[in-house]
């Protein structure tokens, strides 16, 4: 059993193995850090920072698994972005500090690290 599990994801440069950036993985089973706002014309959803701390954790029981969302790629763009609960604060989840310019990114295996054959865009 794994209670209060946090997944810390590191994006590493493939050639040097140096960290480009890191973030807390987003558990796909948790809610979104959004709040609904009514304004008389309808409703909108807005990022709610206060929900992020509770969404960092997942409880994984024996024999069960849970999925992480670690990156997002929009449409036909060649760049992709690291993804966490904080990504909801940005248009189309695009945090420029977590931008990478390659189409591929592979898992480093059981070490919970992600190795990218890329360099961050300047």
Image (cartoon, grey):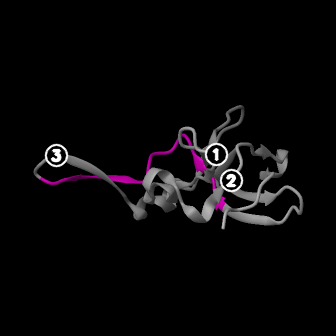
How crowded pointer 1 is (Cα within 10 Å; few <14, some 14-19, many 20+) is rated as: few
Residue 60 x/y as whole percent: 65, 42
Q: Which residue is mark 1?
A: 78
At x 54% / y 60%, what residue is drawn? 95
Helix, strand or loop at disc 1?
loop
- Pick whichever of labels 1 and 2 is earlier in the sequence: 1
Residue interval drawn in magenta: 23-39
**What separation in Å lies between label 3 and label 1 (alpha carbons)?**
35 Å
Label 1–label 2 contact, CB within 8 A: yes
The disc placed on residue 42 is 3
- Pick whichever of labels 3 and 1 is earlier in the sequence: 3
Position of residue 54 in the picture relative to residue 41 (left or right): right
Q: Which of labels 3 and 1 is toward the front?
A: 1
Label 3–label 1 contact, CB within 8 A: no
Magenta span has 25? Answer: yes
Quarter of the figure that contains the N terminus: top right
Residue 120 x/y as whole percent: 70, 62
Magenta span has 1? Answer: no
Along the line of sight, the residue nearer the viewer: 94 or 86: 94
The disc placed on residue 101 is 2
Quarter of the figure that contains the C terminus: bottom right
Along the line of sight, the residue nearer the viewer: 121 or 115: 121
Helix, strand or loop at disc 2?
loop
**What separation in Å lies between label 1 and label 2 (alpha carbons)?**
6 Å
At x 12% / y 48%, what residue is drawn? 41
Position of residue 53 in the picture relative to residue 16 (left or right): left
**What separation in Å lies between label 3 and label 2 (alpha carbons)?**
38 Å
């Amino acid at each position: 059993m794994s209670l209060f599990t946090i997944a810390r994801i590191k994006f590493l440069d493939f050639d040097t193995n140096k960290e480009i950036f890191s973030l807390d993985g987003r558990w796909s089973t948790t809610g979104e850090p959004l709040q609904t706002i009514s304004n008389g014309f309808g409703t909108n959803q807005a990022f709610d920072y206060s929900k992020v701390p509770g969404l960092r954790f997942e409880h994984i029981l024996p024999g069960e698994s849970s999925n992480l969302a670690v990156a997002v790629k929009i449409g036909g763009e060649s760049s992709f972005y690291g993804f966490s609960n904080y990504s909801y604060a940005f248009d189309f989840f695009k945090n420029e500090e977590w931008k990478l310019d390659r189409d591929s990114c592979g898992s480093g295996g059981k070490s919970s690290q992600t190795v990218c054959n890329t360099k961050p865009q300047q």
